[in-house]
Image (cartoon, rainbow, N blue to C red):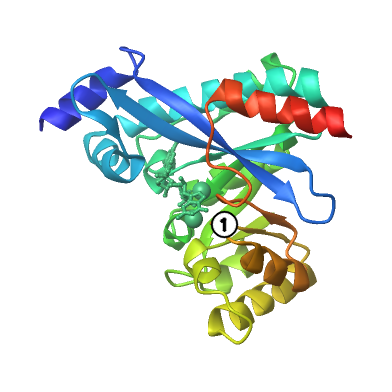
Amino acid sequence: VRLSQALRDAVQAGQLRLHYQPIVELASGRVRKAEALLRWEHPEFGEVSPAAFIPIAEDCGSIHCIGDWVFERAACQAARWRSRFGTDFQVSINVSPRQFQAGGRDFGRWLERLGELGLDGSMLALEITETLLMDTDQAIADKLAQFRAAGVQIALDDFGTGYSSLAYLKEFRIDYLKIDRTFVRDMTPDSKSFLLSEAIVTMAHRLGLKVIAEGVETPQQYALLERIGCDYFQGYLFSRPLPEDAFEGLLRSASCEA
Ligand code: G
Ligand code: G
Ligand code: MN
Ligand code: NA
């Protein structure tokens, strides 16, 4: 109860931050994208993990206000990085199913805002989970279609866990599959995780989707992902999620190398 009250004030009090984790293209070794990850620094509770407070925010409804804040912050950052580092850089944000459901946002405002910032829709990706796609409410499909029509890309997060119904891939236009980090964690040359990841990449490519591997921590995992033709990876092997300035420093040094 105290936490949900504090959470309601967190946006106003400026206690939220976004960190950015680089997403690297395997073929070129370049940082092409970043996933925005929310951080809450509470003066009394210290750093609260999103895994702990997002569910509370969903329950108490502050997820809408927090979600708007995440979007605004990430979009402004994308606009800044675009002008410095070129036009093909993309920022992805996590959106929870609640943000799409009844009482949720009119995302038309988000799309207008992209226009105001001079951003193409393609500079933004939404990371959604299949829980969202399981909901048969037509309004959700309409909202996803609205984003897609504006060029915003859609990534299916935590792919391979949950139900992973292939029907969702048939029904919805998805741009990226994110192989869940539990597969990457258990990946050795003769593991089921490796074979399943290989099958996911093959299937995705046949369907015209790209694959992003999450949670890559070791050179061995990287080598196996390279072998199966995975398109992008993110994880501690390359970098942890970084504060804005540190991330920008990384982009700057990367673009000097090129
Ligand atoms: O950031 P990790 O560092 O702890 O994130 C934990 C979980 O919180 C992940 O499942 C991630 O998708 C989710 N998460 C992180 N940032 C956001 C956000 O801005 N919005 C939503 N809805 N979930 C987020
Ligand atoms: O559910 P989602 O994929 O959005 O969650 C992203 C989460 O994964 C964040 O909590 C982020 O901090 C975490 N993460 C990112 N890279 C790694 C990694 O290499 N190893 C582990 N264990 N977690 C990671
Ligand atoms: Mn994610
Ligand atoms: Na994930």
What residue type is disc 1 on?
Glu
- Residue 21: % across, % down: 58, 40
Residue identified by numbered label 1: 214
Residue found at the very far front of the displayed protein: 219
Residue found at the very far bottom of the displayed protein: 190
On the image, which quarter does residue 168 sit in?
A: bottom right
Q: Is residue 256 above or below residue 28?
A: above
- Residue 53: % across, % down: 28, 38
- Residue 5: % across, % down: 16, 25
- Compare residues 174 and 6 and report the one nearer the observer: 6
* Residue 96 visible, this angle: yes
Query: Cβ of disc 1 within 8 Å of ligand 4?
Result: yes
- Compare residues 95 and 102 and report the one nearer the observer: 95
The residue sitting at 27% across, 43% down in the picture is: 52
From the viewer's perspective, tell me whether residue 130 is left or right of residue 51: right
On the image, which quarter does residue 199 sit in?
A: bottom right
The residue sitting at 11% across, 28% down in the picture is: 2
Q: Is residue 81 above or below residue 205?
A: above
